[in-house]
Amino acid sequence: MLRLLGCALLLASAPALAIDLVLHNGKVWTGDPTRPTASAVAIDDGRITAVGNDADILALADAGARRIDLAGRRVVPGINDAHVHLGAWWQSSYLALPSPDPDRAELEDALGAQPKDGDGWLSASIGAKVLEDPGFTIASLDALQPTRPVILMAMTGHGTMVNSAARRALGIDPGAPVPGGWYGKDADGNFDGRLYEYAQWRMRATQPPLPDAAEVTAIQAHAREALEAGTTSLQVMTMLPAERFVALWQQSGMPQRLRLIRLPIPAAFGDPVDGAGLPREVAGSPRIRVSGTKWILDGTPLEHGAALRSPYPGTNTSGHLNFDEPQIEQLLREIIARDDQPLLHVSGDATAAAVLDAMAAVAPAEAWRKRRLRMEHGDGLRGDLVARARDYGVVVVQNPSHFALAPNAFIAGNLLSGFLDAGIPLALGSDGPPNPWLNMMWAVQVPYGSPRQALDREQVLRAYTAGSAYAEFAEDTKGRLAPGYVADLAVLSQDVLDDAVPVEALPATTSLLTVIDGEIAWRDPAFGTETAETAAAR
């Protein structure tokens, strides 16, 4: 009904309305197949009222409406980042290393240069070169730093190393089983300092919480950067307790729409899911929703943690499933029993096959299509698995930032355009730097993959808006600039859809004006002029 009304409003003969805001003289990419382009947008009470040419839209507004001249700038629906991790890390001296994947010598030089009798923790980011080096163990770390706690975090988030001082401080007991996780062992069967998957996340979840101020600062830093890039919705997965995160977000005062996705870190398999009892709508905070439950089923190809159906080339390993198929079935049944959406980290093809088999055991395809099970990353969906995923209504949320990482044997197959070609819904999320235009560059280049996987710029934008909205059952309310949809949009510093803008220049794009619910949430101080009618109205 709203959309029919919106079409009627486009008639030049329509009477003036109580419109809050008119944006005009722009290049509007609506994301709406019925009207893909326009030059003006009318907004009232947080919703898009009309979209069209300047003359028609300006004629709808009375003298009290605010008018902003876009000066020919590109306008797009607000970006919806479908895969965000938020949460602060404890205080430490962070070591800057030469690369994201330092070798052992580089790490030893950095750790050895730090005072052995100094105060506080030492931390660094490592890659596969250190994480997969069997000769580098907890004893190696102890020799470099015998008293100061050291924690080394894999750049993928799927592995951690500690020295003995950190092990004691964190209360790590390698003999205590953790569902979905495990501990590394040396040739003699002793703990080698490594924690994998849920073992590391459980360790983090059991530490004393950081002060609210530290967490709020981390939230604000990420959300502000995203807002200034034109992101109006964040779908967040955090290891903080769900109820606490909602309170922290409210304290942060950030204006974006938040979808909080539960990310359980249980002490025992089958424990109640944290936040399961929270209402989907948060009283007094209409922009916050709590929905979805995510489980991480394997690692990534970079540390050979993604579970494959055949060994990684040149190795005798094929990765590791965090949960076996009966357990995956149990996780799915629990989520369905709460009428929630399942989100599963799926990287390897063995993991994708296990999920599809578990889905078949739990319910028929027609029932699953209503659930929109999400495969986060979905790298393992290839060949024979693609048609099965389509039939079961699987949605893939991919992260272009992954294509900028070092080449590996598994970046191939249906990772971007192949999903669209196969009829699988595609959404995009950052899972890293919150710059959607940096991710656009990676998605159209695919640095370490086949050019056949690449998307064009409009496909990227559609996946980041309507695609991400579909991935959270919000496709009827956001992701387009069309009558009846929420007035979430961004006015960009350069036209990302114009091929005259070099691909390499895309990451420099910023939002000059970010609007959420029809309200200006961010405005570049140097941008925008308003007409005399606006000044008089104020």
Image: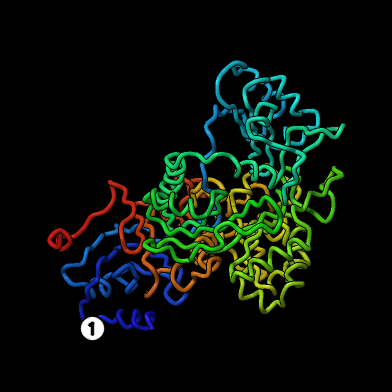
Q: Nearer the viewer, residue 41 or 385?
A: 385
Residue 466 appears at what percent x and percent y? 50, 67
406 with respect to 526 (left or right): right
Q: Which image quarter is the C terminus in?
A: bottom left
What residue is disc 1 on? 13
**Relative to 222, is 113 above or below?**
above
Which secondary structure lies at badge 1?
A: loop
Residue type, label 1: Ser
Q: Toward which corner of the image does residue 196 lie, by quadrant?
A: top right
**Relative to 68, is 6 above or below?**
below
Query: In the rendered image, is residue 493 in sight?
Result: no
The mark total stands at 1
Question: Which residue appears at 48% of the width and 46% of the height?
Answer: 507
Q: Which image quarter is the N terminus in?
A: bottom left
Categorize mark 1 by other alpha carbons within 10 Å: few (<14), some (14-19), many (20+): few
Q: Nearer the viewer, residue 60 or 272?
A: 272
370 with respect to 313 (left or right): left
Q: Toward which corner of the image does residue 293 lie, by quadrant?
A: bottom right
Residue 392 appears at what percent x and percent y? 69, 73
447 with respect to 60 (left or right): right
Q: Nearer the viewer, residue 238 or 401?
A: 238
Question: Which residue appears at 41% of the width and 47% of the height?
Answer: 224
Q: Nearer the viewer, residue 418 or 156?
A: 156
255 with respect to 105 (left or right): left
Q: Toward which corner of the image does residue 151 lie, by quadrant?
A: top right
Residue 170 appears at what percent x and percent y? 64, 34
Question: Which residue appears at 74% of the width and 66% of the height?
Answer: 329
Query: In the rendered image, is residue 443 in sight?
Result: yes
**Relative to 187, is 196 above or below?**
below
